Image (cartoon, rainbow, N blue to C red):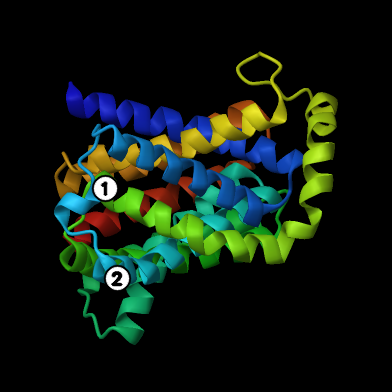
Amino acid sequence: LRVSSFIFFWYFLNAIFAIINKRTLSVFPYPWLLSWVQIAVGAAFMLVMWRLRVFKPPSTVGFDAKSWKALWPTSCLHLVAHVTACASYSLGSVSFMQVVKAGEPACSVILLTLFFGRKYSKLVWLTLIPIVGGVAVGSTTELNFSMASFVCAMISNVASALRSVTSKDLQDATGLRGINLYGAMSVVGAVVLLPISLIVEGAKLPAAFASAPAGMAAKGITLFGATVPFLAYLFVGSMLFHLYNQTSYQALGELSPLDISVANAVKRVVIILASVAVFRNPITPLGAWAGAVAILGTFLYSLAAQ
């Protein structure tokens, strides 16, 4: 029951976040600033949880200057993955972005083979065929195809693949695990991303916050049917981002590799179905089949990689 609850909330929170994030970007199209707010809210939440001892504080498991330094590379990759994912959401449909994100295993295998000397079986390479083919066909049949959205999603894939590699070494170097590792990465990420986001989009911040409420009213954007201020909407979306990541770490910590493979594949399907139901973005039958093949390929890859 405990694991089932984690998985349910992981799916539910992730799907709701994807919808709210897309709507937020429609009135606040600044992925750098939005990403910083989302990560900073999560970091502040974790600091409060550590202070209240809801979660075991990192200081008790070796979070020192050495660990702080070790966190930087992985935290930066986490930032790149999230900022480019937000940009992809802003430039294209949620369902299209999720189909392209299904190509992450292909990026991982290619990068690890070329730059890290990793060897993979023929079976693993064969599972990349439905992934690459599904993403390719899904992209070409996307009615509202955006090359910029595709490129951003692919950059997010590369950053996520590299983050997975460095995360394993990071756990050994810092002793941090699960939600504490994610919380520490959020704290470092919030510090690193603030100056960058201000340099890239800071000049637009006053006008962006001033125009967002009118944009919400014009588009009829509400929070579960209730009219709320933009800052409240932004805060809820940011908390959903943190909580879906937290529940995913908690769920994955309780699952076997096979269960994780199934959970990740089903999660992507849930998000796509939820976004199509809410945004009514058109999908061709061939595009739907291509997305299904790509997601099935990620599942087969996970099995073959074990």
Give the residue drawn at x 67%, y 32%: 231
Image position of 179 with respect to 79: above or below: above
- When asked about the image quadrant of residue 175, the answer is bottom left
Q: Is residue 299 left or right of residue 120?
A: right
Describe the element under mark 1 as helix, strand or loop.
helix
Image position of 196 with respect to 115: above or below: above
Please tell me how crowded label 2 is: few (under 14), some (14-19), or many (20+) other residues with Cα within 10 Å: some
Q: Is residue 89 left or right of residue 57?
A: right
Where residue 180 sits: x, y (%)? 26, 48
Query: Would you name the residue on which mark 2 appears?
Result: 70
Give the residue drawn at x 41%, y 70%: 107
Give the residue drawn at x 42%, y 27%: 12
Residue type at numbered disc 1: Asn
Describe the element under mark 2 as helix, strand or loop.
helix
Q: Is residue 134 visible?
A: no
Query: Which label number is shown at residue 4?
Result: none
State the residue in front, 278 or 174. Answer: 174
Please tell me how crowded label 1 is: few (under 14), some (14-19), or many (20+) other residues with Cα within 10 Å: many
Q: CA distance from mark 2 to mark 1?
A: 15 Å
The quarter of the picture where the N terminus appears is top left
Give the residue drawn at x 40%, y 63%: 75
Q: Is residue 20 left or right of residue 39?
A: right
Query: Which is more N-terminal, label 1 or label 2?
Result: 2
Residue type at numbered disc 2: Ala
Query: Would you name the residue on which mark 1 appears?
Result: 180
- When asked about the image quadrant of residue 124, the answer is bottom left
Image position of 230 with respect to 193: above or below: above
